Amino acid sequence: MGRIPLYYEAKLIAILYLALPQTRGALKLFQDHQDKLDLLYKQAIEQLNKIQAVMCLRPSPYMHYKHYIYVCYCIFISYLYIDICRFSKR
């Protein structure tokens, strides 16, 4: 990154804009992209429901590793989404 002029300064300004409560940059960014995040969240829940339906049809003692990682990812995203929505309503 030493070849890009002012990289670290630009990165610092971007992080400060997102983190400082005076600018409310993260909230503005979330509100600008909330529709896209809602769509992503709904798609993740639909995929999770499909995976659970398949697992119920073919019960096995071990869940496939890929599906396990995806389920954990969906749960993480849903908790993150709920926290963001709660924060944005304040």
Image: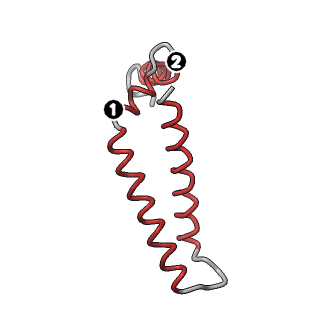
Q: Is residue 30 left or right of residue 70?
A: left
Which percent across, then down, holds residue 65? 58, 72
The residue positioned farthest toward the right in the image shown:
61
Which percent across, then down, holds residue 6? 41, 19
* Residue at horizontal 38 percent and vertical 58 percent from the top: 43
How far apart in space, not on screen, are marks 1 and 2 (Cα)? 18 Å
* Residue at horizontal 45 percent and vertical 31 percent from the top: 1
Kind of element beneath mark 2: loop
> Which residue is denoted by mark 1 in the rendering?
32
Kind of element beneath mark 1: helix
Which percent across, then down, holds residue 66? 53, 70
* Residue at horizontal 52 percent and vertical 31 percent from the top: 87
Q: Amino acid at mark 2?
A: Leu
* Residue at horizontal 43 percent and vertical 58 percent from the top: 44
> Which residue is denoted by mark 2 in the rendering?
20
Mark number, residue 4:
none
Could you say which is closer to the camera, residue 66 or residue 23? 23
